[in-house]
Image (cartoon, rainbow, N blue to C red):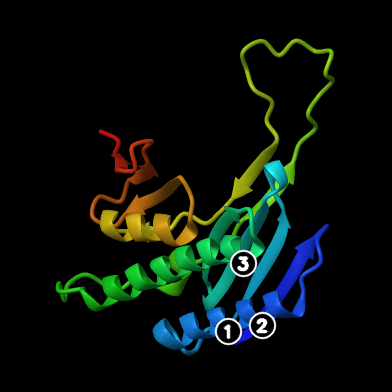
């Protein structure tokens, strides 16, 4: 598995790079030995802390993301790595627990994280926007067709707060989202 370690405005030493490589290879060997690669990015966080963002390409089209923040770079990395490991564990358990033979497994195209950002002009600071917030970026993604339970799994894998999908049973657009109390909400049109 190809592992890259980089830093934004900080220097990543050999010890940190070796630790990242060892830990990511251990996760890949435990859950998915054919993983393509991972990229760990370290940066400065608020209050003299460190941030670590990991993007792991497990297979073609399946991207996992994890974030960690702590006063030490190693601890920040461990937080992000635990998030990746938890996502992989849930994904593998989900694939093994499929008991209904009638339900198809999600395809790689349904799980892929294909987003691009378009940055808009923020406008003049002198303009009075009132209560309306400025639109900064728009995310473009493919809308997968899946069951509600598969959509919740994709929500976890993409490490996002909301996911719009086409319900495979009804054919209508639905949305699952993470509520403030940690539970999952489901929006289905009438």
Location of residue 81 in the rendering, given as x and y in whole percent from the top left corner: 52, 68
Q: CA distance from mark 3 to mark 2?
A: 11 Å
Q: Mark 3 or mark 1: name the one nearer the start of the chain.
A: 1
Q: Secondary structure at mark 1?
A: helix
Give the left or right position of residue 35, taking residue 46 as reference: left
Location of residue 136 in the rendering, given as x and y in whole percent from the top left corner: 70, 35
Q: Nearer the viewer, mark 3 or mark 1?
A: 3
Q: Residues within 10 Å of mark 1 (few under 14, many from 20)?
A: few
Residue 83 in the image: above or below residue 136: below
User: Which one is in front, 70 or 30?
Assistant: 70
Q: Secondary structure at mark 2?
A: helix
* Residue receiving disc 3: 74
* Residue receiving disc 1: 22
Would you say the residues marked 1 and 2 are in contact, meaning their CB atoms lie under 8 Å apart? yes
Q: Which mark is residue 178?
A: none
Location of residue 40 in the rendering, given as x and y in whole percent from the top left corner: 65, 69
Give the left or right position of residue 51, taking residue 179 as reference: right
In which quadrant is the C terminus drawn?
A: top left
Q: Is residue 65 visible?
A: no
Q: CA distance from mark 1 to mark 2?
A: 6 Å
Q: Which mark is residue 18?
A: 2
Q: Residues within 10 Å of mark 3 (few under 14, many from 20)?
A: many
Give the left or right position of residue 58, taking residue 175 as reference: right
User: Which one is in front, 64 or 80?
Assistant: 80
Q: Secondary structure at mark 3?
A: helix
Location of residue 25 in the rendering, given as x and y in whole percent from the top left corner: 54, 85
Q: Mark 3 or mark 2: name the one nearer the start of the chain.
A: 2
Q: CA distance from mark 3 to mark 1?
A: 13 Å
């Amino acid at each position: 598995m190809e592992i890259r370690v980089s830093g934004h405005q900080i220097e990543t030493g050999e010890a940190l790079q070796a630790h990242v490589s060892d830990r990511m290879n251990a996760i890949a060997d435990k859950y998915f030995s054919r993983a393509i690669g991972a990229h760990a990015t370290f940066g400065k966080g608020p209050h003299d802390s460190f941030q670590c963002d990991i993007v792991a390409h497990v297979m073609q089209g399946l991207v996992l993301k994890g974030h960690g923040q702590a006063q030490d770079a190693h601890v920040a990395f461990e937080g992000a790595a635990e998030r990746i490991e938890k996502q992989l564990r849930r994904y593998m358990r989900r694939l093994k627990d499929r008991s209904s033979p009638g339900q198809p497994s999600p395809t790689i195209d349904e799980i892929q994280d294909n987003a691009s950002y378009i940055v808009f002009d923020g406008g003049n600071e002198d303009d009075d926007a009132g209560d309306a917030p400025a639109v900064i970026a728009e995310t473009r993604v493919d809308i997968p067709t899946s069951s509600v339970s598969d959509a919740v799994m994709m929500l976890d894998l993409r490490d996002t707060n909301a996911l719009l999908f086409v319900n495979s049973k009804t054919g209508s657009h639905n949305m699952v989202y993470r509520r403030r109390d940690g539970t999952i909400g489901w929006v289905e049109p009438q």
